[in-house]
Image: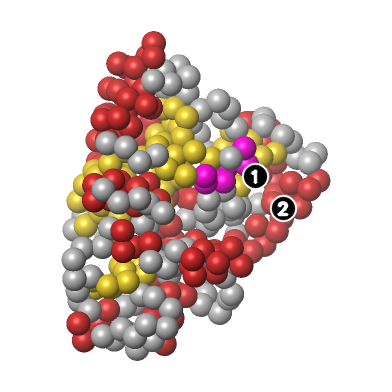
Amino acid sequence: MVLHVFNPSHDEALAAGTHRYTPSRAAQRMERELAELPLRWASPGDAVLLPGKAVRWEAVERIEPWGWDTLVKHRLRQLGAPERLLPTDEALQTLRALSSRATAVRLLPLLRGDVEGTFGESRMCRSEDEVRRALADYGPSVLKSPWSCSGRGVFRIVADTDSKGMNRVRRILRTQGAVEAEPYYADCRDFAMEFYYSGGELRYEALSLFSTDPAGGYRGNTLAPQERLQEMLLASVPAQAMAARDTIGRVREAIRRHLPRLLGDGYEGPLGVDMLMRPDGTLHPCLEINLRQTMGRAAWLCHKKGVPLQ
């Protein structure tokens, strides 16, 4: 059987880079309240790790956490998980490096070079001077820590005269070693593509529509048939719907060509690529890459099974 584990502290654990840290109160609360969430898409015979419930490790063939990191490995080992079910420390180090926003920064120009009707630029800055140069080039910008999720570690800044913003830059540089910078894109529609990567092959699974708050924090996904989700996305650009539909398809295939070369054999499992669509129908093809289970994929799986996401 497969043992599913909901560990919403995953992205925090990647940022920490060690199991010797305490997840935020929000992550702890979410883990307690939504521990049974994977039951909504688990297959018959699978199990979900629940607080206080023993695990028959001899029956477990594979563990599928929300995302692999050193903290969840440490917790599972403490619960008696055999080493055969756990990734090596070296594999987790590779996964952490691939999960950095630097992977999205590398993928973006490859996609834009292949597909017309796309926009977007970004760069990784490893010093305060590099951040200042990015702000001078981009103007109003969005800065992001290399490892963060759901809008945390993401903030807007207009110029390097923003002392509060620059203090935050210094803190991220000190703790994570880099900051991603990109222009601020207004009036765009959020969406994502969900994939599964295994054996060097990237398989497309689903389109995902989600909403965010003004700060970029995740609000929720739309549950609907795939055809309806695409109609809803294209309805935001009625005059350019046909061209946008074609661009979406070409972006999907470009991701399948290029992303496996960046991932190599350093990851296996579900992943999502977040995107933006402008009112003119042009696409930002790679705003972010999530090498883990995502709420968009969870919404797709729940809709297939006819169960609510929450």
Q: Is residue 218 magenta?
A: yes
Cβ–Cβ below 8 Å for labels 2 and 1? yes
Q: Is residue 142 magenta?
A: no
On screen, residue 188 above or below 48: above
Residue 172: x, y in percent? 65, 57
Q: Determine whether the residue tagged by mark 2 lies in a helix, strand or loop.
A: helix
Residue 122: x, y in percent? 52, 38
Q: In the image, which residues are magenta?
A: 214-219
Considering depth in this image, is 33 or 233 the residue closer to the camera? Answer: 33
Residue shown at 52%/53% (left/top)?
A: 149
Considering depth in this image, is 88 or 8 the residue closer to the camera? Answer: 8
Relative to 297, 153 lies left or right = right
For disc 1, the neighbor class at 10 Å (few under 14, some 14 to 19, many from 20) is: some
Residue shown at 37%/51% (left/top)?
A: 309
Q: Which mark is residue 155?
A: 1
Q: Quadrant of residue 160?
A: top right
Considering depth in this image, is 243 or 232 the residue closer to the camera? Answer: 232
For disc 2, the neighbor class at 10 Å (few under 14, some 14 to 19, many from 20) is: some
Residue shown at 65%/44% (left/top)?
A: 155
On screen, residue 91 above or below 246: below
Q: How many marks?
A: 2
Q: Which mark is residue 168?
A: 2
Residue occupying the far top of the picture: 239
Query: In what quadrant of the picture does the N terminus appear?
Result: bottom left
Residue occupying the far front of the picture: 307
Is residue 286 something one can see in this rendering? no
